Image (cartoon, rainbow, N blue to C red):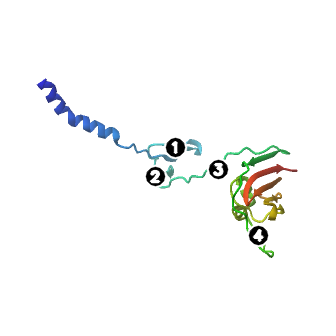
């Protein structure tokens, strides 16, 4: 029994050292080097002199996230909608004509139900056509094809100022 206790007391520092070594974070650096025929080669060791294209520790890559939505076939319609809900803020209607707000037609692909008229106006600009609204609480905004969103008519349906349906129709 005494021999076992002595063994455990002597082994304790070794066990602690092993546990600390296993808990140390692994550090990996990726290097982008000029490979044979000018093709880039990614490796974990530094590039030979004159062959370094990028050190990801010194120059990390930027990250961009794009939604993966399939493009609709020609002549088809895609719809996104929210279930009908009571409530929501009604949009205030201003008197007089203001200059049209310019937005990005490329943003039309990323509009989804649930946002309010103000955000749509800020992102897409003034619609080409409007119908409804006022006392009816339901409004439709239509954006015609533009160079950034060619061959697509986008119709947005609002209820009480909130976007509830997005319809994209491919036209030729």
- Residue 23 point in image, percent of width and height: 34, 40
Q: Earlier in the sequence, mark 2 or mark 1?
A: 1
Q: Residues within 10 Å of mark 1 (few under 14, many from 20)?
A: some
Q: Nearer the viewer, mark 1 or mark 3?
A: 3
Using the image, tell me which numbered label, if any, was put on residue 57. Answer: 2
- Residue 69 point in image, percent of width and height: 70, 45
Calculate the distance from the C-alpha at mark 3 to the C-alpha at mark 2. 24 Å
Is label 2 in a helix, a strand or a loop? loop
Q: Are marks 2 and 4 in contact (CB under 8 Å)?
A: no
Calculate the distance from the C-alpha at mark 2 to the C-alpha at mark 4. 53 Å
Q: Nearer the viewer, mark 2 or mark 1?
A: 2
- Residue 126 point in image, percent of width and height: 78, 65
Q: Earlier in the sequence, mark 1 or mark 4?
A: 1
The residue that disc 1 covers is: 42
The residue that disc 3 covers is: 66
Residue 163 position by quadrant = bottom right
- Residue at image coords 70%, 57%: 87
The residue that disc 4 covers is: 93
- Quick check: 82 left or right of 128? left
Q: Quadrant of the N terminus?
A: top left
- Quick check: 69 left or right of 30? right
Q: Residues within 10 Å of mark 2 (few under 14, many from 20)?
A: few
- Residue at image coords 81%, 75%: 97
Above-or-below relation of 77 to 130: above
Above-or-below relation of 160 to 73: below
Q: Residues within 10 Å of mark 4 (few under 14, many from 20)?
A: few
Q: Residue furthest bottom?
A: 96
């Amino acid at each position: 029994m005494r021999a076992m206790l002595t063994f455990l007391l002597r082994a304790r520092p070794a066990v602690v050292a092993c546990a600390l070594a296993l808990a140390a974070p692994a550090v990996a650096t990726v290097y982008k080097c000029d490979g044979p025929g000018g093709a880039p080669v990614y490796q974990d060791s530094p590039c030979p002199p004159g062959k370094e294209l990028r050190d990801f520790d010194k120059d990390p890559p930027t990250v961009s996230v794009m939604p993966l939505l399939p493009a609709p076939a020609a002549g088809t319609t895609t719809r996104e909608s929210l279930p009908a809900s009571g409530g929501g803020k009604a949009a205030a209607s201003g008197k007089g004509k203001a200059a049209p707000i310019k937005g990005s037609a490329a943003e039309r692909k990323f509009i989804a139900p649930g946002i309010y008229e103000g955000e749509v106006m800020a992102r897409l600009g003034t619609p080409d056509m409007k119908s409804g609204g006022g006392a009816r609480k339901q409004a439709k905004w239509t954006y015609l094809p533009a160079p950034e969103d060619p061959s697509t008519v986008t119709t947005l349906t609002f209820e009480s100022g909130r976007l509830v349906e997005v319809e994209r129709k491919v036209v030729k």
